[in-house]
Amino acid sequence: MGDHQLFRNRNVLGIDAGLLTAGSGESTRSIGLQITPGSMFNRESYGIAVASLNGSGKTTGLHLGLWNGTNIRGIEIGLVNFDFEPFGCSEQQSRTEIGLKVGLLNTSSCTGPMVGISLGVYNTQVDLTGLQLGLINNAFILSGVQLGIINIISSRKGFGRMLPFINAAF
């Protein structure tokens, strides 16, 4: 029986701490505090998750990690915050992300919108309502402001598609 089978259909309520994984599998739901120096994968996470690698289908709360792959409603702090398959996109593609992302790289391949602030060296969102603050900012659809060295609104044509220092669309 592999690790995935061991934790299948596992729900955690309260505090979950481990060395390698804290939750794994499609039906895993975590509510409370999770701490591990290794990796953590949950279908849904509510509360605080601290790990080197956090991956959840959808998260409500706080994720602290080197690499966070999730669809967040709350705060995500890490070197890399990246919403991608299999963590944050699959059936949650249309789920709106709400909150704050802080990292060197904040990026999303999901089609769902983000409402909030993305603070990092490189920020890219498909659909953003809010603020991007970084060296390079890219939003396909923007309703808000970008502050950085290079600011790109990918859906815009001509002048204003890429501007230095500030770009905005409302």
Image: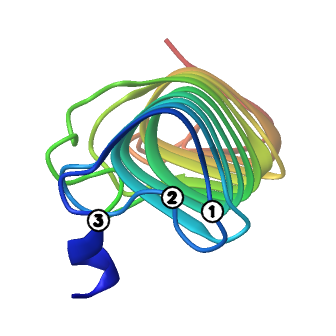
Work out which quarter of the rendered image holds the N terminus and state it: bottom left
- How packed mark 3 is, by other alpha carbons closer than 10 Å (few <14, some 14-19, many 20 or more), is some
Q: Earlier in the sequence, mark 3 or mark 2?
A: 2
Under mark 3, the amino acid is: Pro
Q: Residues within 10 Å of mark 1 (few under 14, many from 20)?
A: some
Q: Amino acid at mark 1?
A: Gly
Name the image quarter holding residue 41: bottom left
Looking at the image, is 11 positioned above or below residue 98? below
What label does residue 22 carry, if any?
Answer: 2
Disc 3 target residue: 86
Q: Identify residue for label 1.
A: 18
Look at the numbered discs 2 and 1 and tell me whether their residues touch, using CB distance below 8 Å. yes
**What distance separates the C-alpha of mark 2 from that of mark 1?**
6 Å
Q: Position of residue 123 (x, y in %)?
A: 65, 49
Q: Residue at x 63, y 62 (%)?
A: 18
Position in image of residue 39 (x %, y %): 57, 68
* Image depth: mark 3 or mark 2 in front: 2
Residue neighbourhood size for the residue with mark 2, other residues' Cα within 10 Å, grouped as few (<14), some (14–19), many (≥20) = many
